Amino acid sequence: MKTAPQLPIEVDSETGVWTTDALPMLYVPRHFFINNHKGIEEEIGAERYADILYKAGYKSAWHWCEKEAALHGLSGEAVFEHYMKRLSQRGWGLFSIEAIDLEAGTCRVRLDHSAFVYEYGKVGRKIEYMFTGWFAGAMDQILAAAGSPLRTLAEQTQSAAEEGCDHGVFVTRPR
């Protein structure tokens, strides 16, 4: 097993709050998170849950990219690259940018070793919908910071949880 470069994690000795870069963090076991995810999905349905997570993920990605861009002096594609690196370092899976065109408002992200697929297995459907809003939120924050009025939508087009697929794919396009 290769060891990834460590994330800068600070723990406040008075409060116990964990911080990575400029943001407070939570640290929970993967099975705990996925079991909660499955429980909510069973109660309200995957489609409704996906809608809720898209909006929340969009807002969170925008905020994260805004804070990280300011902290590290990043802009444009460098912000998106940094976001993919950090997501990959946090156990969600390995995210790689297959294509990105900020002027067109498009990108294609590949996901290997999905935490969701590790827990769900091959279930014949796209299960990483939690991430979808993240890509649109990140793209839109980067576009807004550059003065572009363009805004995007994101969707998952494939999942390693589907038969015949070995990785996930997410795409963004203009609204």
Image (cartoon, grey):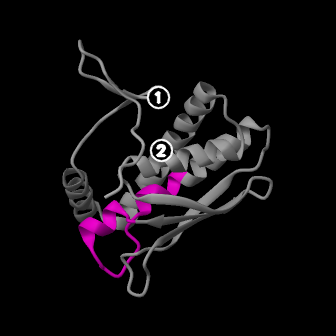
Inter-mark Cα distance, 2 to 1: 10 Å
Q: Residue at x 36, y 55 (%)?
A: 2
Depth check, front residue: 131 or 16: 16
The numbered mark at residue 86 is 2
Dividing the picture into quadrants, the one containing residue 73 is top right
Mark 1 surroundings within 10 Å by alpha-carbon count, few (fewer than 14), some (14 through 19), many (20 or more)? some
Q: What residue is disc 1 on?
A: 21
In the rendering, which numbered label is found on residue 174?
none
Q: Quadrant of the C terminus?
A: bottom right
Decide: marks 2, 1 in contact (CB < 8 A)? yes
Task: Identify which residue is drawn at 45% across, 48% down.
Answer: 87
The magenta stretch spans residue 16 = no
Q: Is residue 103 above or below residue 112?
A: above
Q: Residue at x 57, y 38 (%)?
A: 65
What is the residue that sits farthest to the bottom in this orientation? 164
Q: Quadrant of residue 120?
A: bottom left
Residue most extreme to the front: 2
> Looking at the image, which residue is at 45% across and 73% down?
167
Is residue 127 shown in magenta?
yes
Residue 85 position in % (x across, y down): 51, 48
Q: Percent from the top left, x then y, of residue 142?
A: 68, 42
